[in-house]
Image (cartoon, rainbow, N blue to C red):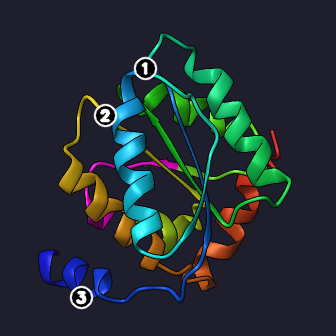
Amino acid sequence: MGARTESRQQTVRSPPLRIAIASDHAAFALKAELGAALAEWGHAVCDLGPDSDARVDYPDFGYKLAAAMAAGEADFGVALCGSGIGISIAVNRHPACRCALVSDAYAATLAREHNDANVIAMGARLIGIDQAKACLQAFLAGTFAGGRHEGRVAKLSHPTF
């Protein structure tokens, strides 16, 4: 798995992508570091907040990120909170979003290949900056495989229950 992930990380999309990023207070520092890395990689970053590490509620920022994605204001989104779980649930409430909570680069790659994820979520209390950057690089370098995955992905935005 490692060699496969490493080779995919070296494949970089043509910048600039428009990336919306949002967090809660627990992930404020990680948001700042990932936002700076995205800008360094040549992407246009839209920081949706918060503006400090003062206590906030992750659903508010998850919904804000989902709205930006649904409005076409960003190509991809980055959602961060303490565990990554809460904000990913909030983002996934919007049918235009397919948010994948990941903790390694291979999972980030599969999120793009199999699920056509357009938002990546990570937990600041569970992942280090180097691992988070590796996940983000793999996510942005990934492409949707289509084929047998297309019908499944379509069902994510149009449930039949």
**What residue sits 86% from the left and 54% below the top?**
71
Left or right: 92 as drawn, with respect to 52: right
Q: In this view, does 100 lie above or below 5?
A: above
> Picture quarter containing residue 131?
bottom left
The residue type indicated by label 3 comes to: Ser
Cα–Cα gap, marks 1 and 3: 36 Å
For marks 2 and 1, give the one nearer the viewer.
Answer: 1
**Mark sitting on residue 53:** 1
The residue type indicated by label 1 comes to: Asp
The stretch of residues the image draws in magenta is: 100-107
Q: Name the residue under label 3.
A: 7
**SS category of the residue bearing label 2:** loop
Numbered-mark total: 3
Q: Mark 2 points at which residue?
A: 124
* Circle 2/circle 1 CB separation < 8 Å: no
Q: Which of marks 1 and 3 is nearer the N terminus?
A: 3
